[in-house]
Image (cartoon, rainbow, N blue to C red):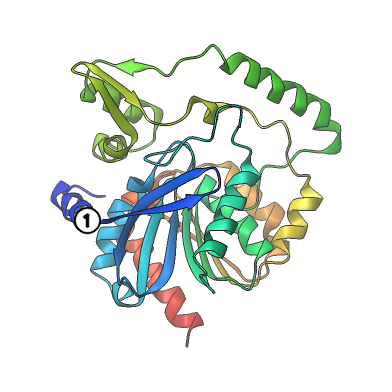
Amino acid sequence: MLDNTLLFQQARQCAEPVAFQLPWGVIRGLAWGNPEGEPLLALHGWLDNAHSFVPLADAFLQSELAQRYRLIAIDWAGHGHSDHRPVGNFYPFMDYVYDLWYLCQQQQWPQVTIVAHSMGAYVANMYAGIEPQRVTHLLAIEAFGLLASTAADTTNDLRQGFQSRWQQQDKKRPHYRDLNTAIAARTHAGDFSRELAALLVARGIEQLGEHDFRFRADGQLRLKSPVRLTAEQIADVLSHITCSFDVVLGSAGHERLKQAITAWRPYVKQLNVHELEGGHHVHMEQPTAIIGLLSQITRTHNG
């Protein structure tokens, strides 16, 4: 487990802010490593932000990977320092996949390596199926496949999705009297230490007044999705993935992922599964192990 905040400070201080203009707004993030290196994209989970990868960045900078790669951790739309989607728009899952697709097209990255957590990893495995020639390696942390619906769920999914949009209209984001209160709230909502929660809050909070703090994340992120793919559709996308694909599970992570691996593994023959001690945010708890695994993967598959 991590207990040295100085390492976090060093990784944060040497991070380079990055920004990408997309049609709807600006995606912002942080970058480390060789400015001319191959892109190593770090994609965070739901309601997290680019600071989710600060511990990993510290381990990355001390590894051989820092010479070859440019580690780029983005904030998804509505998260961290990135813009919120325009009023009247929502956050359907496939729009995240499109944002990643658009970003790679815009930056003319011929190939990318991806390390991704939770929602970011679900986005990444969909992208790897849609654009198999562009993804060389995918390391997914606590995610595999996608949540599916059956055709018989369609009406109920639509009904609940529309109702959640309607109900969100009157909801306001909570305010906190000080930073410690906000950190306590994030710690309570997560499965990690106060130290790691504070790291996420540092990028995810904004101060509006002397005793007025609010999380930056768009409240619309909490809406239920009115449409999900069926199992058959998900299987079709997964079956097109050709890159090396490794999944890391936390020993105390989400239990449903073991069922997902059983269900979807037949469609990704090259899948390798690893387990590390930790929770759902195991990449923040075990960054050195994650970087060691990524180094091994890139060496093995690049000869």
Furthest residue in direction left, as rendered: 6
Q: Position of residue 125 (x, y in %)?
A: 61, 58
Q: Position of residue 76 (x, y in %)?
A: 47, 45
The residue lying at 47 percent from left, 51 percent from top is 21
The residue lying at 62 percent from left, 59 percent from top is 127
Is residue 178 in view? yes
Q: How many badges with numbers are in the image?
A: 1
- At label 1, counting other C-alpha atoms closer than 10 Å, the crowd grade (few under 14, some 14-19, many 20 or more) is many
Question: Closer to the camera, 104 or 23?
Answer: 23
Residue for badge 1: 11
The residue lying at 81 percent from left, 31 percent from top is 153
Above or below 66: residue 25: above
Q: Position of residue 38 (x, y in %)?
A: 42, 74
Badge 1 element: helix
Residue type at mark 1: give it.
Ala
Instruction: Answer left or right for 82 relative to 222.
Output: left
The residue lying at 58 percent from left, 57 percent from top is 102
Residue 227, quarter of picture: top right
Above or below 168: residue 88: below
Instruction: Answer left or right for 180 relative to 274.
Output: left
Is residue 142 in view? no
Furthest residue in direction right, as rendered: 152
Question: Closer to the camera, 272 or 226?
Answer: 226
Residue 213, quarter of picture: top left
Furthest residue in direction bottom, as rendered: 303
Question: Closer to the camera, 83 or 38?
Answer: 83
Question: Closer to the camera, 79 or 52?
Answer: 79
Furthest residue in direction top, as rendered: 170
Instruction: Answer left or right for 295 relative to 148.
Output: left
Residue 15, quarter of picture: bottom left
Q: Position of residue 209 (x, y in %)?
A: 23, 18
